[in-house]
Image (cartoon, rainbow, N blue to C red):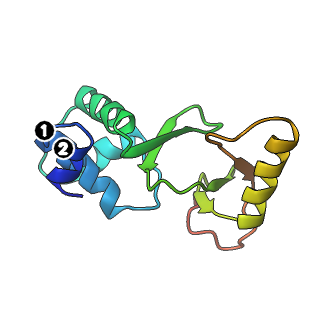
Amino acid sequence: MHPADLRHAGLKATLPRMKILDLFVARAGQHLSAEDVYRLLIESPSDIGMGTIYRVLSQLEHAGLLKRSNFQTGKSVYELDDGRRHAHLLCLDCGRIEEFHDEALEHRQTAIAAERGYRIQDHSLALYGSCTKPSCEHRSK
């Protein structure tokens, strides 16, 4: 993302906003908590504190650049908001979050809503389970 993307979203291109947004761009498809962002920022020379991180994440969410999800863990995680609807698979053992898109499922959800007199504005679907991969790289040792 570029400073113009922030300005287009109505935000000034400050250093904390640029650094945090750059983290999400570099890790597109990943879901990061505020603590994850903090951990990644201290790996590089940065003096951005947790208060600033929470504030910037909220600003980027309200500007439509990030999307927030609250899964069963109770912790908010953020991802780039590319405008495409998708669902999530969450492993209860290793904590991995995997995105998926299924056109048939999208059509079915729209049909179910229409049958009941609704038009979907937004949706969130999260499936919780245990990964069956014998050598899951994300599972704690």
Quadrant of the rendered image containing residue 86: bottom right
**Three-letter amino acid code at the position of disc 2:** Arg
Q: Earlier in the sequence, mark 2 or mark 1?
A: 2
Frontmost of labels 2 and 1 is 2
Secondary element under disc 2, as helix, strand or loop, is: helix
Task: Compute the Cα span from label 2 to label 1.
Answer: 23 Å
| On-image quarter of the N terminus | bottom left
**Three-letter amino acid code at the position of disc 1:** Asp
Mark 1 neighbour class, 10 Å CA radius: few under 14, some 14 to 19, many 20 or more: few
Mark 2 neighbour class, 10 Å CA radius: few under 14, some 14 to 19, many 20 or more: few
Residue 80 higher or lower than 61, as above or below:
below
Q: Which residue is located at x 64 percent, y 63 percent?
A: 100
Q: Foreground: 96 or 113?
A: 113
Q: Position of residue 113 (x, y in %)?
A: 80, 42
Q: Which residue is located at x 82 percent, y 50 percent?
A: 111
Marker disc for residue 7: 2
Q: Position of residue 64 (x, y in %)?
A: 39, 42
Query: Relative to residue 118, is residue 74 drawn left or right?
Result: left
Residue 125 higher or lower than 11, as above or below:
below
Residue 120 higher or lower than 59, as above or below:
below
Marker disc for residue 47: 1
Q: Can see residue 53?
A: yes
Q: Which residue is located at x 32 percent, y 45 percent?
A: 37
